Amino acid sequence: MKRFWRPLIAVLLAIVLWRSAVFVDETEFVIVTQFYRPVRTLAQAGLHFKWPYQSVLRIDRRVQIYDPRPSEFLAKEKKNVDLDVFVCWRVEQPEFFLETVGTFPGAEARLHDLVWSALADAVGSHPREALVSTDRDVHKLDELVHDVGSRCFERAIEDYGIRVVDVRIKRIGLPSQVRESVFKRMRDERARIASQYRAEGDEQAMQIRADADKARTAILAKAYRTAENTRGAAEAEAIAIYAAAHKADPEFYELRRTLAAYRKILDEKTTLLLSADSDLLRFLTSKPKKD
């Protein structure tokens, strides 16, 4: 009989020990519950024990990321803007979190309402240029996000036992219904700037052409003046040479000039009708003088 009870007692003790042992990982909180009511929280990693009739709930204590779809917000000048926002959060008070929220999807739903309300209020108090401007004096995006994170941090701890670690904006865009008009305005602006550049380029090209024509005219005038001066000097020198030759031997000079004229005006295809006493034919028709 004793041999029968000993294995049974050993099995019962093993079951009790297995039901009593709780291993806590460093990435989680373990809430010990008794009849569905939390009695204590195990936050230190390692082996812990509880009563066999108690149960445990495990809650991830690591940072969670809530990344919903982009939403539209209304800026101060009543213009819509698309913001793609994500929220980093983690459980800070596990028992309070279990009582107020219960699950992670429920926590994200509460965070969505909390963060989006604060974000809508912050965006509505700033013009749209404050979110996208490159001017440091106008750009207020960093201040806006910091203000939203600070406001959500306090309320999330007090209301849900959640710590908001960070709130960040991934992307800023325009609603689809106004995007095309904005693109059209941007294209028109670029076309206006391009036209202005082309007009300035045409003006500079005309000025360059005018300067080039002016320089060309001046160079040609100078070259023509130099050529005329050279030609005049050459003709004066030629006249002086002709005069000296004529003075030295007038008859021989006249003969050479007449022969040169024959060479220019007479060939196989030329026919001349001249009188017999013409000076041009004098050397062809006259008889040579005898010494």
Image (cartoon, rainbow, N blue to C red):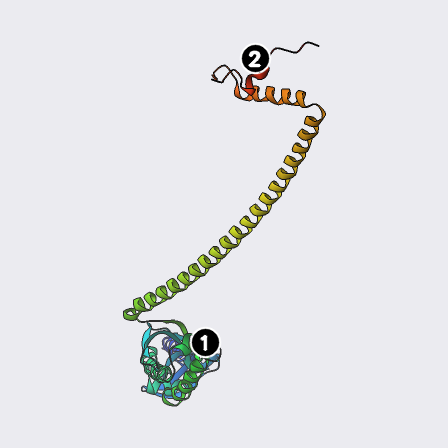
Residue 27's mark?
1
- Label 1 SS: loop
57 or 203, which is in the foreground?
Answer: 203
Q: Examine the rendered structure and indicate whether residue 286 appears above or below residue 57.
A: above
Q: Examine the rendered structure and indicate whether residue 22 appears above or below residue 243.
A: below
> In the displayed structure, does residue 227 sit left or right of residue 39?
right
Q: Mark 2 = which residue?
A: 285
What amino acid type is highlighted by mark number 1? Thr
Q: Is residue 173 visible?
A: yes
What amino acid type is highlighted by mark number 2? Thr
Q: Residue at x 55, y 17 (%)?
A: 281
Give the number of the mark in front: 2 or 1: 2
Question: Residue 249 at x, y = what percent?
Answer: 70, 23
Callout 2: 10 Å neighbours few (<14), some, many (20+)?
few
- Looking at marks 2 and 1 on the same chain, the residue that comes earlier in the sequence is marked by 1
Q: Is residue 166 visible?
A: no
Q: Residue furthest left?
A: 177
Q: Residue at x 68, y 26 (%)?
A: 246
Query: Residue 65 lies in what quarter of the image?
Result: bottom left
Question: Residue 99 at x, y = what percent?
Answer: 33, 87
Query: Residue 119 lies in what quarter of the image?
Result: bottom left
Q: Residue at x 58, y 43 (%)?
A: 224
Residue 257's mark?
none
97 or 38, which is in the foreground?
Answer: 97
Query: Residue 54 lies in what quarter of the image?
Result: bottom left
- The quadrant of the picture occupied by the N terminus is bottom left
- The quadrant of the picture occupied by the C terminus is top right
- Label 2 SS: helix
Q: Examine the rendered structure and indicate whether residue 248 appears above or below residue 269.
A: below
